[in-house]
Amino acid sequence: MKKICIIGLGYVGLPLAHAFSKKYQVVGFDINKPRIDELSSGFDRTLELTAEEVNESIKNGMIYTTSSDDIKDCNIYIVTVPTPIDSSNRPDLTPLIKSSQTIGKVLKKDDIVIYESTVYPGVTEEVCVPELEKVSGMIFNKDFFCGYSPERINPGDKEHTVTKILKITSGSTAEIAIVVDDLYKSIIIAGTYKASSIKVAEAAKVIENTQRDVNIALINELALIFDTMNIDTNDVIEAAATKWNFIKLKPGLVGGHCIGVDPYYLTFKAEELGYKPNLILGARQINNGMGKYIAEKTIKLMIKNNKKIKDSNILVLGVTFKEDCPDLRNTKVTDIVDELNEYGVNVDIYDPWVDLTEERTHFTHKLMETNPFEGNKKYDSIIVAVAHHQFIKLTQEDYRNISEGNETIIDIKGIVKNPSWRL
Ligand SMILES: NC(=O)c1ccc[n+]([C@@H]2O[C@H](COP(=O)([O-])OP(=O)(O)OC[C@H]3O[C@@H](n4cnc5c(N)ncnc54)[C@H](O)[C@@H]3O)[C@@H](O)[C@H]2O)c1
């Protein structure tokens, strides 16, 4: 009888735990006590699960806990902890190491530990397994086994939810690969793909996001080139996309916990092995520079529109890293704000998706508590940074009502009808 423990109940772990709870006994473990308390009361602040779904998991017998005593009698451990980078863009494997140590303390003969966190090839077997062996005193592939099955969910996307996305699976032996694959097959409606090894599965995930990052960087670079030529990049993309094999992407900020972070896992390992990944690092540099470019563009447009810069008021609409989602992690909208602040302007940030209590504890930028479209303050420039559905609905008149003089609208998401400039 399988009893599954999910370690790390964030954007990835919670929906997975809920899906497994429909068929298996599940324990959800997290070190964040407020998160566990909220989930136990039926609330998911990531908004990936509704209150009904969280309560359904509880009804299914799932328990939410911070106590390692509660995970002792599980036989499958699935790790979905964060894999961030440090200030020098190097992988920070601390959560993976710590969660492996937690599991090591309760590991029993024939248990299987499956990692889902995005990593560079080799992390499961070269970093996590030694921790499991050291703490448990057991031997890998003799006493216990491992798997790796990357997650592909897209926060805020209510269509491509966990069971509807084909899942890559792998195992530390041929037999365990089948057990891991069967386990996921039992809940993933879209099916599974059994990779030939754990390293292949790890590499597959990290290149999915690296490919996207590099492709977006190309479009961003083209946008910078076309801007100097006074050509609308979006028009160029529409025209080019009439060819069957053109990859249609939009220019923009690349933030969030995945695309802007995962490539550094790959480049770190490549460089450690003596290969300099110039293309991937160049793409990172282009994407990381977009916020500064947008801020500078805003200032230039304001000067062109005869607006003073120092002490002017600029409104930034949206700060989460993507639309219709409360996730603030690694948002690059703050790059725009930070650069604007260098010019001595006052920047107001408004985002109806951000939980202000949460924001106060974790986010260094202050957010408006009221809707600027319902107030009297006038802005010299407005930057539409995130395509939340609330902003898509805004009209020219809405912008005019809160603009000082002629409106200067910077649209980086292509959702404003007649912007002063769009990326
Ligand atoms: N968010 C996404 O869209 C997405 C998509 C695919 C893959 N991933 C990958 O999945 C992994 C998890 O991402 P996420 O977005 O769910 O992160 P998250 O920050 O939303 O959640 C991680 C959870 O792990 C908990 N945690 C941290 N250390 C722990 C420990 N030692 N023991 C137990 N719990 C611990 C945290 O408290 C948090 O609740 C990352 O590797 C990420 O790259 C994320």
Image (spheres, rainbow, N blue to C red):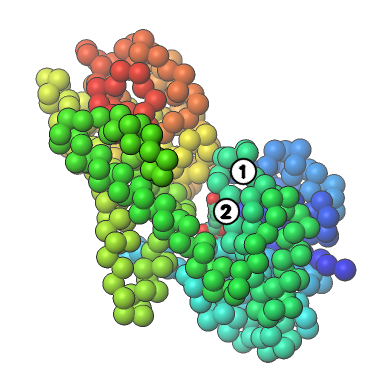
Relative to 95, does residue 318 appear above or below in the rendering?
above
- State the image coordinates of residue 362 (x, y, percent, origin top left): 47, 48
- State the image coordinates of residue 38 (x, y, percent, origin top left): 68, 46
Quarter of the rendering containing residue 331: top left
User: 176 or 380: which is nearer to us?
Assistant: 176
Quarter of the rendering containing residue 413: top left
Mark 1 and mark 2 residues within 8 Å of each other at the beta carbon: yes
Relative to 151, 221 lies left or right = left
**To which residue does mark 1 refer?**
160
- Residue 217 is at least partly visible in this image: yes
**To which residue does mark 2 refer?**
152
Relative to 366, does residue 165 appear above or below in the rendering?
below
Tell me which amino acid carries mark 1: His
Labels 1 and 2: the sequence-earlier one = 2
Which residue corresponds to the image point at 52% horizontal and 34% vertical from the top-left? 324
- State the image coordinates of residue 338 (x, y, percent, origin top left): 27, 43
- Residue 330 is at least partly visible in this image: no
> Crowdedness of circle 2 by 10 Å Cα count: few (<14), some, many (20+)?
many
Q: Secondary structure at mark 1?
A: loop
